[in-house]
């Protein structure tokens, strides 16, 4: 009985200590400044000859204003610029800029809820490693946040408030999630970009965005292509659809071809299913060839002329026309990335390592081999529904 009382007393003390600790942590969290978006730009260069001050970083944090987001009884929530505060600081690197930013605020910054990190294109072309290391080493940072490359300044992007956005950083996150769900954008969180950066058989990509402060428009512009950690080029939105079909077996978007009967109108095909198979082979010359077979199913979404595609001969011709057009687009994007950018964003090197491990062991520089690689594409299209016609 005595031991039981002692145990209950210890349990009570332990429970009280847990409650007090939780309350203290909750109090501590409530006093922290929640950062929901970060932007990194190159600050204005000074005229000094000291290297330490010739390449300065400008870090912009979009912080939430709790009073504005919580609202009150019968009061609407604040939106746009009223709900957040964008504050900037300059430093010799991201860490120093972060410390300088912290000194401008009363409470401690908390980046555990940061959803997007925006880096300007000019910095991305210099190389990502010097900027990403801060986030890789910070235990608070969410590895499933998204890295965006802005065609304009990152600060300007964070200061652009679309009229339909409650919180601007969340608007960006919702835009990304919607595009991923529609299979028109690759799902590339921060951790995926970091892993690609240290993997021999695949090069990184990042989501490319642009903005117009006057109209408040932010749009998805395509993909930023990297060779190693340096941005070397871009793919526009339609080229990104081809990338998705070739690299990830995703649907992409509309395919538009000429009408079969009169060649006067256009037919829009929406893909509803896509299956992809890729296998690497070694040619007689010792180069690599990648055999890619795509089976796609689609429906006629719209047509400009009243051709009846109930006739089997027309459907066969339309399917062949879609296959030819899709094959051409895939090859165009492959050769653009291969010959112009020399960056294996498709992950073909990883396929060689998986299926031809002995050949992979012989490779010293995969990019040199990728430059000589061949792509063999076969596309089979099936139109399931001809749609409505007059």
Image: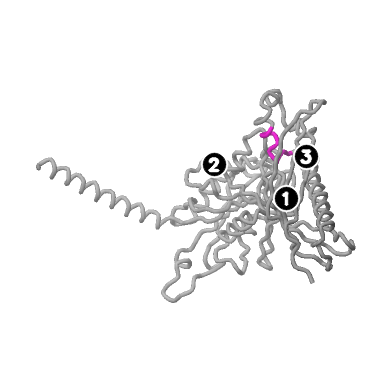
Q: In the image, which disc is placed on residue 296?
A: 1
> Which element is circle 3 on?
helix
- What span is in magenta? 343-351
- Mark nearer the viewer, 1 or 2: 1
Secondary structure under badge 1? strand
- Dot 3 alpha-carbon crowd within 10 angstroms: few under 14, some 14 to 19, many 20 or more: many
Callout 2 crowding tier (Cα within 10 Å): few <14, some 14–19, many ≥20: some
Q: What residue is pinned by disc 2?
A: 136
Q: Is residue 171 visible?
A: yes
Tell whether position 361 is magenta: no
Residue 66 pos. (x, y %): 45, 63
Q: Position of residue 218 (x, y in %)?
A: 66, 61
Check the image and report above or below for 63 versus 280: below
Q: Nearer the viewer, residue 373 or 313?
A: 313
Q: Percent from the top left, x then y, of residue 163?
A: 61, 69
Q: Secondary structure at mark 2?
A: helix
The numbered dot on residue 163 is none
Determine the residue positioned at 62% across, 40% down. Answer: 129
Q: Nearer the viewer, residue 261 or 4?
A: 261
| In front: label 3 or label 2 | 3
Residue 374 appears in which quarter of the rendering?
Answer: top right
Residue at left offset 48%, top offset 63%: 65
Q: CA distance from mark 1 to mark 2?
A: 39 Å
Mark sitting earlier along the chain (1/3): 1
Residue 41 visible in the snapshot = no
């Amino acid at each position: 009985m005595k031991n039981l009382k002692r145990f209950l007393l210890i349990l009570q003390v332990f429970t009280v200590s847990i409650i007090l600790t939780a309350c203290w942590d909750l109090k501590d969290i409530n006093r922290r400044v929640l950062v929901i978006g970060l932007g990194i730009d190159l600050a204005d260069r000074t005229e000094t000859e000291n290297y330490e001050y010739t390449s300065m970083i400008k870090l912009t944090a979009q912080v939430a204003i709790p009073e504005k987001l919580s609202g009150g009884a019968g009061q609407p929530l604040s939106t746009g610029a009223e709900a957040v505060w964008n504050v900037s600081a300059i430093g010799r690197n991201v860490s120093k800029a972060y410390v300088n930013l912290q000194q401008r605020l009363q409470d401690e910054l908390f980046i555990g809820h940061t959803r997007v990190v925006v880096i300007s294109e000019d910095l991305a072309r210099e190389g990502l490693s010097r900027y990403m290391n801060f986030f890789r080493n910070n235990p608070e940072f969410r590895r499933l946040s998204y890295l965006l490359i802005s065609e304009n300044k990152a600060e300007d992007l964070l200061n652009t408030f679309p009229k339909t956005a409650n919180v601007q950083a969340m608007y960006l996150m919702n835009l990304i999630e919607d595009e991923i769900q529609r299979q028109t954008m690759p799902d590339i969180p921060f951790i995926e970009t970091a892993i690609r950066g240290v993997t021999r058989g695949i090069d990184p990509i990042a989501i490319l965005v642009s903005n117009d402060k006057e109209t408040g428009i932010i749009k998805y512009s395509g993909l930023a292509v990297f060779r190693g950690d340096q941005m070397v080029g871009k793919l526009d939105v339609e080229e990104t659809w081809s990338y998705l079909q070739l690299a990830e077996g995703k649907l992409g978007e509309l395919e538009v071809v000429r009408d079969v009967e009169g060649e006067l109108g256009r037919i829009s095909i929406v893909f509803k299913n896509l299956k992809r198979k890729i296998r690497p082979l070694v040619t007689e010359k010792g180069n690599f060839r990648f055999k890619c077979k795509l089976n796609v199913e689609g429906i006629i979404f719209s047509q400009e002329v009243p051709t009846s595609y109930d006739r089997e001969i027309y459907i066969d011709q339309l399917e062949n026309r879609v296959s030819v057009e899709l094959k051409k687009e895939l090859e165009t994007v492959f050769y653009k990335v291969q010959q112009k950018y020399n960056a294996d964003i498709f992950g073909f090197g990883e396929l060689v390592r998986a299926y031809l491990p002995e050949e992979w062991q012989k490779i010293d520089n995969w990019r040199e081999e990728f430059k000589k690689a061949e792509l063999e594409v076969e596309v089979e299209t099936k139109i399931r529904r001809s749609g409505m016609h007059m």
